[in-house]
Amino acid sequence: MANKKVLLLGAGFTANFGAPVASQVWNDLFNFPVIQKNWGLRSALKSHQEMSDFEEFFSEVVHGFNFTKEEKQIVATAVIEIYERINAHTETLMIHGNSSGICFQKLMYFLKRFSNLEQGKGFVFTLNQDLFLEKLVNKYLRKDKRFSDFSINYPFINSPYVDDTWKSKLPTQDRLNELLTLPNVGGSLHLGRKFPYYIKLHGSSGWTHDDDKISIPIIGKNKSKQILQEPLLKWYINFFEQTLDETVDIWVIGYSFSDKHINELLMNSMQRHGSMLYVVDTKTYNDFMKQILSFDSKLYGLIDRQLRGYLPYLLKKIFPADDFRHFDTLTA
C-alpha cells in the first residue's frame, strides 16, 4: 500500500499568485500612515529593517510589554488589513482572468492526489492565513464540471463559503470537546473522506470568536505558545503531529523551514519513521540546503538523507498554462 501523502503549504505557495512575501509585508506596514505618524511604532519597525522581518516587529508590539493597547491594536489591524488586500487581489485574479501563468486545473489535479483517503492518501496542511485556496476550490473551480464534487473544508469549524462573508467562527473548548465525541470523528477524522481537509495550523483571516472579535493569526515569536491558547489550533497541531507519526510522503511547497515547532515534527517523522520529503522552492538546491544549514544542522542532515525530490521552480513552470513540461514529474 502506498504511503499516506501529506502536503504542507507555506507563504511561498500563495506568492506564486501575487501575494506578498515577508519583506513585502514589511514594506506595506512601513507605508501605513498611522504607523508613520507613531514614532515608537515606526522606530520598532525600522529596527527590523535589515531582515525585513515584519513577524518579529509584530511580536514585539502585539505580544510585548513596551507598547500601549492602542498601539497593539494599530499593528494588529494593519496586518489584518494586509491579509484582506491579499484576499481581494487573489480573488481579482480569479474573476478577471488568470494572469499568473499557472493552470488552475492542473493544480487541482495535483491537490486531488491528497484526497481519497481510504486509499492511503492524505491531508493538506497550511501555514498560510489568506483565503486564496478556499476561494479557488470552493467558489470558482467548482463551476468546472471536472471539479464540481471536489471541495476543501476546515475540521470543526464552519466552511467559509457558506455565504459571501467568508467568515468562520472558532469553536470554544466546550464546543470542540462536544464535536470530538460525535461518532466517527475524533481519532477517525482521517477515514472515509473523498476530498482533503484543509488544516490551517496558524489560523486564518476571516476567523472570529463567539463575541465576533477577530482572531489574530499566529505570527512572530513563540508560535507554539500562541497555538496552545486557541483550542482549535491546539487540536490542529496535535493532529499534524499524529499524522506524521508514521511513514508518510511529505510534500512541501513554499515553506522556508523557519518555524521551529513545525521543523521538530517534520524531523521526528523523517528520523523515527523514515518519511520521505519532496520540496518545491524557487531557490536552487544548493541555496536551499545552505539556508537549511543556517537554521539547524540536524534538520540539514535529515533533509540531506530523506529528500527524494526537489523542484526549483515557480508553480507556473510546474503547472504551466500552455504545456505539461514539469507537470508530469510532479504528478508521477
Image (cartoon, rainbow, N blue to C red):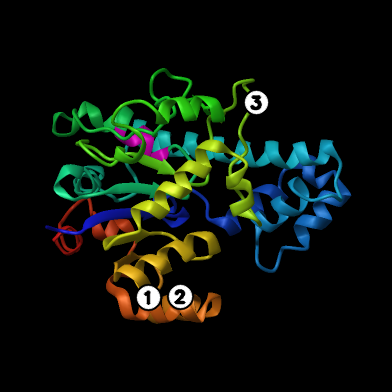
Callout 1: SS = helix
The kind of residue tagged 2 is Leu
Mark 1 or 3, nearer chain start: 3
The kind of residue tagged 1 is Ile
Callout 3: SS = loop
Dot 2 corresponds to which residue? 299
Residues packed near mark 3 inside 10 Å, few (<14), some (14 to 19) or many (20 plus): few
As drawn, the label of residue 139 is none
Q: Is residue 305 above or below residue 86?
A: below
Would residue 237 appear left or right of 119 to someone viewing this image? right
Dot 3 corresponds to which residue? 213
The span from disc 1 to disc 3 (Cα, nearest Å) is: 40 Å
Would residue 38 appear left or right of 19 to someone viewing this image? right
The span from disc 2 to disc 1 (Cα, nearest Å) is: 6 Å
The kind of residue tagged 3 is Lys
Q: Nearer the viewer, mark 2 or mark 3?
A: 2
Q: Nearer the viewer, residue 310 or 230?
A: 230
Tell me which segment is drawn in magenta. Answer: 132-137
